[in-house]
Image (cartoon, helix red, strand yellow):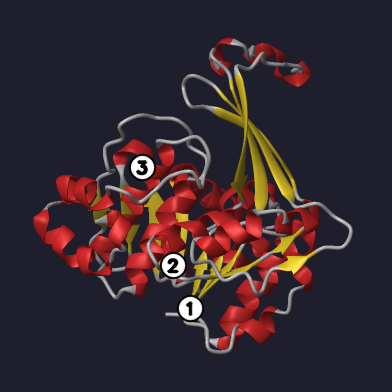
């Protein structure tokens, strides 16, 4: 299965705050908010939605083709890291003038997060010739990226008849025009959201819950500790429990890891429930470490089997890399 992964590549900077944001923010002073937090730690990690999903796929032995725009700093180790994890980076565009995107976040003791994102070279994703890459592709994943590139890529996929995943994620909050929101979703084979984004999509698109399902093949909504639900028009929903976490370290990248696991199982030809279960497993593995690409598949099979049973494990084991068994 040839999977194109269009999305951001970024450097992530994480700071941890030992207190609670909720105790520092005064609701009646929000119009004048000016806060700073004394943090305990600063950690730099590789990130970006496109790269995170590609890393998840590659960690399971599935090679995705990353389609992204980066700065020259990408070649100072990040490209090699991804290629060492089975990611094809030939379609990555290197900007001559901009640094790679950067995400800076502070995380409190309740795992709440305040972050900022600098787009940088990501804005040049619109200059990548997606039309030349689509022939022969089995699936295009449109994850958060330059807004114009996302809208163009979904339009090209529809025109070419290439199935696509609509993964609007954080870009959804910035979109104001209902037609543009709808254009990112309409015709998607798979729509991937978290529970907050599901409500936000309905608000911004003007579509009801049922109307969204009229426009997509399958809607997948991650629910944090409550697992994940997949819905198709006219069918009973499929629900999967979350893999119990051993520790909560960092929520950043957990959704991307879910997508990597889901897509890997999909590429192996497994059914919807197994795809959701493997996605949920990777999502928890990412949650347990600080940084979206610091987790490992080591011990995955044991934890998957403990959570979802021997029959489910038997279906995925033949496809897993040796490190995961």
Q: What is the quadrant of the C terminus in the image?
A: bottom left
> Can you see residue 8?
no
- In-image side of 133 versus 308 (left or right): right
Residue at horizontal 23 percent and vertical 61 percent from the top:
236
Count neighbours of disc 2 (C-alpha within 10 A) and say few if under 14, some if 14 to 19, many if 20 or more.
many
Residue 74 is tagged as none
Q: What secondary structure is found at the residue carrying circle 1?
A: loop
The residue labelled by disc 1 is 163
Give the CA distance from mark 3 to mark 2.
21 Å
Count neighbours of disc 1 (C-alpha within 10 A) and say few if under 14, some if 14 to 19, many if 20 or more.
some
The residue labelled by disc 3 is 284
Residue 244 in the image: state x and y as whole percent. Answer: 26, 37
Residue at horizontal 67 percent and vertical 63 percent from the top:
180
Residue 199 in the image: state x and y as whole percent. Answer: 49, 46
Residue at horizontal 67 percent and vertical 50 percent from the top:
10
Most extreme residue toward the left is 310
Residue 282 in the image: state x and y as whole percent. Answer: 37, 50
- In-image side of 226 versus 41 (left or right): left
Q: What secondary structure is found at the residue carrying circle 2?
A: strand
């Amino acid at each position: 299965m040839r999977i194109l992964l269009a999305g951001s590549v970024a450097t992530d900077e994480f700071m941890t705050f030992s207190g609670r944001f909720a105790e520092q923010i005064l609701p009646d002073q929000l119009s004048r908010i000016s806060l700073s937090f004394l943090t305990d730690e600063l950690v730099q990690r590789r990130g970006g939605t496109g790269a995170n999903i590609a890393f998840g796929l590659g960690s399971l032995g599935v090679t995705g083709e990353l389609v992204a725009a980066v700065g020259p700093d990408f070649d100072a180790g990040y490209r090699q890291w991804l290629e060492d994890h089975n990611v094809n980076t030939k379609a990555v565009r290197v900007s001559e003038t901009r640094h790679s995107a950067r995400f800076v976040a502070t995380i409190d003791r309740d795992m709440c997060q305040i972050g900022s994102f600098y787009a940088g070279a990501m804005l040049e994703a619109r200059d990548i010739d997606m039309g030349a890459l689509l022939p022969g592709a089995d699936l295009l994943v449109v994850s958060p990226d330059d807004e114009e590139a996302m809208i163009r890529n979904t339009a090209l996929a529809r025109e070419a008849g290439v199935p696509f995943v609509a993964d609007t994620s954080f870009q959804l909050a910035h979109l104001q025009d209902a037609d543009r929101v709808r254009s990112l979703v309409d015709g998607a084979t798979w729509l991937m959201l978290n529970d907050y984004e599901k409500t936000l999509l309905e608000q911004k698109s003007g579509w009801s819950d049922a109307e969204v399902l009229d426009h997509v093949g399958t809607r997948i909504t991650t629910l944090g500790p409550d697992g994940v639900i997949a819905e198709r028009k006219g069918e009973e929903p499929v629900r999967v429990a979350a893999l119990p976490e051993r520790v909560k370290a960092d929520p950043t990248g957990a959704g991307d890891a879910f997508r990597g696991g889901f897509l890997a199982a999909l590429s192996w030809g497994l059914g919807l429930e197994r795809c959701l279960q493997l996605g949920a497993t990777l999502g928890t593995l990412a949650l347990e470490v600080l940084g979206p690409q610091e987790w490992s598949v080591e011990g995955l099979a044991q934890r998957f089997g403990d959570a979802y049973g021997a029959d489910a494990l038997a279906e995925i084991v033949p496809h897993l890399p040796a490190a995961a068994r």
